[in-house]
Image: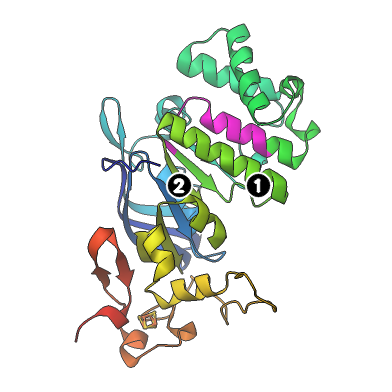
Amino acid sequence: MSIGNTSILRAVDIYGEYVVSPLLSVKAVTNVILHMNSGEIVGIAGESGCGKSTLVKILYGYIEPSLRVRGRVLLNIDDGTIDLLSVDEEYKRGRIWWRYISYIPQNSMNILNPYMRVGDHFTELLKKHLNLEKDEAIRVAGEYVEDLGLRKDVLKAFPHQLSGGMRQRIVVALSLLLKPRVIFADEPTTAVDVVLQKVLLQYLLDKQKEYGSTLIIVTHDMSIHAMATERIIVMYAGHVVEEAPTELFYEDPKHPYSRALINSLPRLGDKGIRQGLAGQPPSLINPPPGCRFHPRCPYSMDICRREEPPINKYENGWRVKCWLYVKR
Ligand code: SF4
């Protein structure tokens, strides 16, 4: 796997909150700064509700009506750099989504139009972006679905006539169809069985390599990050708490939350079930002061309860948001 060192996507000072009422909001993502390099595979990890799916939607430029966002998401395209949070949705639908960046959600029905045949999803994209005639588009679509172990006649079906696993394969094929520079995969294999999980993940990795795309895998499954990613970003309660090269991270995770995530992974020779992290992530309506992890952290100190920790930077782009690493 090759890691490019040219940044293709940069997120600058990102805040995202779901507005529940004029006085109430869920602060899903707070002050996130990160970048993605060309051709690398990045993992975003953390428990459910830590803000990783919201972050990915913001990075993709998909802003749901109740989501209020601040910051910039800068994407390099052929004719310059655009801020995905400033350009309008029509422009993203017409020029950017699928072609430069694509998104694989956990639930395939979030992407597929229930009133369109599967094949029409492919022909529409291929006509719009590559100006392919229908016959040629169907031929290309057939190759993609066969690569994923499906028969070509699925192209004639409506999405509801297929199983969840078949639909997820269709969405993966669509997401790769235009060889996008950036692919977001949000829990892409969570809703399918173990055999299909392996097939889909390997297919994504093969195509990432073939196209030189940047692949961002979002999952709570730490074994997938260990197996597939080159760099890992750990989120807790809306903050990025650690970012590191994956291999080094698994040898010596620095943040107490990262350690807990890795310690919950099963090991060869384990006889019992490993304990997960005690307690629950905090409410993001009213997150705890100081370090948001302090109610669950075995190393919590006075300052952790009072002041938000700074980000400590190390070699290889390693970053840790924790008071333990601040010299005082
Ligand atoms: Fe634990 Fe304090 Fe570090 Fe937070 S800042 S992870 S509470 S040691």
Q: Residues within 10 Å of mark 1 (few under 14, many from 20)?
A: some
Question: What residue does disc 1 label?
Answer: 197
Dot 1 or dot 2, earlier in sequence: 1
Q: Quadrant of the N terminus?
A: top left
**Residue 138: x, y in percent?**
63, 14
Residue at far right of view: 161
Tell whether position 323 is magenta.
no
Depth order, front residue of 298/156: 298
Does the rendering let one see residue 297? Answer: yes
Dividing the picture into quadrants, the one containing residue 299 is: bottom left
Magenta range: 168-182
The amino acid marked with disc number 1 is: Gln
Q: Looking at the image, which residue is at 65% across and 19% down?
A: 142
Depth order, front residue of 283/59: 59
On the picture, is 15 further left or further right than 119? left
**Residue 288: x, y in percent?**
43, 80
Report whether the residue tagged 2 is closer than 8 Å to ligand 1. Answer: no
Q: Looking at the image, which residue is at 54% across and 33% down?
A: 175
Report whether the residue tagged 1 is closer than 8 Å to ligand 1. Answer: no
Q: Which mark is residue 216?
A: 2
**Residue 44: x, y in percent?**
46, 56
Dividing the picture into quadrants, the one containing residue 265 is: bottom right
The amino acid marked with disc number 2 is: Ile
Of helix, strand and loop, which mostly describes the magenta segment?
Answer: helix
On the picture, is 278 further left or further right than 42? right
Dividing the picture into quadrants, the one containing residue 312 is: bottom left
Q: Quadrant of ligand 1?
A: bottom left
Tell whether position 181 is magenta.
yes
Seen in the picture, residue 115 relative to 82 is either above or below; the reply is: above
Verify CB contact (< 8 Å) between mark 1 and mark 2. no
Seen in the picture, residue 322 relative to 67 is either above or below; the reply is: below
